[in-house]
Image: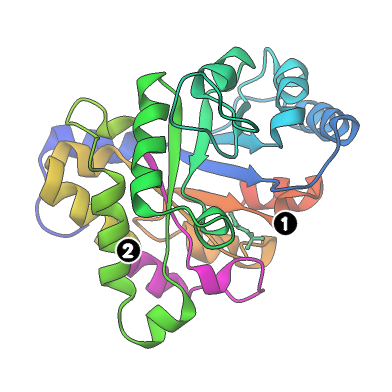
C-alpha cells in the first residue's frame, strides 16, 4: 500500500471482496448453462469470501438466474444497448437484463471494441445506461500488442477510462467494476506478468483517485483478464491491486473455474 492511509480508507480496502467472473462469450447452450449452474451450486455450499458471477449468452441468462436462485452466485449479461427500448433490431436493454434477473453487465469488452467496432463513445453511453438501471457494469479496458510495443499502453488505457467514465458522476463511480484485459493476452495463452498487471491496476486506481478521490479509488474493484488459468491465477490475484479475475476460456470448465476461485486469499 503506497503512502499512509487513514482508518476509513483502510476499511474500504479490506472490504474489497474478490470477484471471480466467468465470461462465456458465445459458448454454452441453455441446457449446458443449466447443467454448469447446478453443478456449481452443488459445489459451493459454504458462504465464500469470493464473489462469483457468471456471464452466459443473453439466451441462457434466465436459465442461469433460475438455477442460481437462493445462492450467493450472480449472473450478468455480456453487453447491453444504451437506449431503454425502441426500434433497435437485435439489441437488448438494461431493463431487459434486469427483467431476466441479472445484476451485472460487461461493457466495452475488447472483442466488441475490435470485432464489432465499438468506440469509446459507445462504451461511455453503455456504461451510463447500465448505471441508470442499477446494473453493475464490468468496464473493460486494455491495449493491443501494437499499442504496448509502441509504449502507449498507459495512455490508451487512460484514455479508454477517461472517455468511458465521461457520464459517470461521484455518486455512481463506486458501482463500477473495472477489468484490465490486455488484448494480446485474451484467448492467446499469454498472460501479463503479475507485476505488469499490478502496474496497470495501479494506474487505473490512480486515475479514479485523480478524478473521484481516495474514497472511490479504494472502493472500486479492478479485475484482471486475459488467459487466466488455474496455474497462473494465484500469482495474479495476490497482487495488491488485483481484486479478481474475468475469466474466458478457463471458465467454461467447472473444475478449472472452481480452482481459479479457490486460488484467492
Ligand atoms: P480468456 O478471455 O480468459 O479466454 O483470455 C478473457 C476475456 O476475454 O474476458
Mark 2: is the Cβ under 8 angstroms from ligand 1?
no
Q: Which part of the image, by quadrant, shows the N terminus?
A: bottom left
Taking the image as shown, residue 150 lies to the left or right of residue 84, namely: left
Whether residue 221 is visible, yes or no, is no
Judge whether 153 appears above or below 201 on screen: below
In front: mark 2 or mark 1? 2
Q: Which residues are magenta?
A: 176-200
Q: Where residue 99 sits: x, y (%)? A: 59, 13
Quadrant of the image where one finds ligand 1: bottom right
Q: Examine the structure image and report whether residue 208 is included in the region drawn in magenta.
A: no
Q: Where residue 264 sits: x, y (%)? A: 54, 50
Mark 2: which secondary structure? Answer: helix
Judge whether 222 appears above or below 87 on screen: below
Work out whether mark 2 precedes mark 1 in sequence or the reverse, and give the earlier one. 2
Q: Which mark is residue 157?
A: 2
Q: Residue at x 31, y 40 (%)?
A: 220
Q: Residue at x 77, y 49 (%)?
A: 252
- The Cα–Cα distance between marks 2 and 1, rounded to whole angstroms, is 25 Å
Taking the image as shown, residue 154 lies to the left or right of residue 95, namely: left
Whether residue 113 is visible, yes or no, is yes
Q: Nearer the viewer, residue 197 or 128?
A: 128
Residue furthest front in the image: 87
Q: Residue at x 82, y 33 (%)?
A: 33
Judge whether 70 appears above or below 230 on screen: above
User: In which quarter of the view is residue 37 placed?
Assistant: top right
Q: Examine the structure image and report whether residue 184 is included in the region drawn in magenta.
A: yes
Q: Which residue is mark 1?
A: 250
Q: Residue at x 47, y 67 (%)?
A: 182
Q: Where residue 190 sits: x, y (%)? A: 60, 76
Q: Residues within 10 Å of mark 2 (few under 14, many from 20)?
A: many
Q: Which mark is residue 237?
A: none
Mark 1: is the Cβ under 8 angstroms from ligand 1?
yes
Amino acid at each position: 500500500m503506497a503512502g499512509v492511509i487513514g482508518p476509513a480508507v483502510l476499511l474500504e480496502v479490506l472490504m474489497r471482496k474478490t470477484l471471480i467472473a466467468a465470461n462465456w462469450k458465445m459458448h454454452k447452450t441453455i441446457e449446458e448453462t443449466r447443467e454448469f449452474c447446478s453443478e456449481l451450486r452443488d459445489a459451493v455450499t459454504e458462504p465464500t469470501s469470493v464473489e462469483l458471477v457468471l456471464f452466459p449468452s443473453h439466451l441462457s441468462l434466465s436459465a442461469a438466474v433460475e438455477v442460481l436462485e437462493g445462492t450467493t452466485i450472480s449472473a450478468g449479461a455480456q453487453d447491453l444497448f444504451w437506449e431503454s427500448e425502441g426500434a433497435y433490431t437485435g439489441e437488448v436493454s438494461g431493463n431487459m437484463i434486469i427483467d431476466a434477473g441479472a445484476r451485472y453487465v460487461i461493457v466495452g469488452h475488447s472483442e466488441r471494441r475490435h470485432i464489432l467496432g465499438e468506440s469509446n463513445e459507445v462504451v461511455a453511453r453503455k456504461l451510463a445506461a447500465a448505471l441508470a438501471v442499477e446494473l453493475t457494469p464490468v468496464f473493460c479496458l486494455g491495449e493491443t500488442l501494437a499499442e504496448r510495443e509502441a509504449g502507449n499502453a498507459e495512455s490508451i488505457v487512460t484514455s479508454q477510462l477517461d472517455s468511458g467514465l465521461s457520464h459517470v458522476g461521484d455518486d455512481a463511480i463506486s458501482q463500477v467494476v473495472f477489468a484490465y484485459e490486455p488484448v494480446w493476452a485474451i484467448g492467446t495463452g499469454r498472460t501479463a506478468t503479475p507485476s505488469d498487471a499490478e502496474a496497470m491496476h495501479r494506474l487505473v486506481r490512480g486515475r479514479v483517485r485523480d478524478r473521484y478521490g481516495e474514497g472511490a479509488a479504494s472502493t472500486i474493484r479492478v479485475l484482471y483478464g486475459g488467459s487466466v488459468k488455474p496455474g497462473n491465477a494465484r500469482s495474479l490475484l495476490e497482487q495488491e491491486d488485483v481484486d479478481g479475475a474475468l475469466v474466458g476460456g478457463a471458465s467454461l470448465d467447472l473444475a478449472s473455474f472452481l480452482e481459479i476461485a479457490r486460488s484467492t486469499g
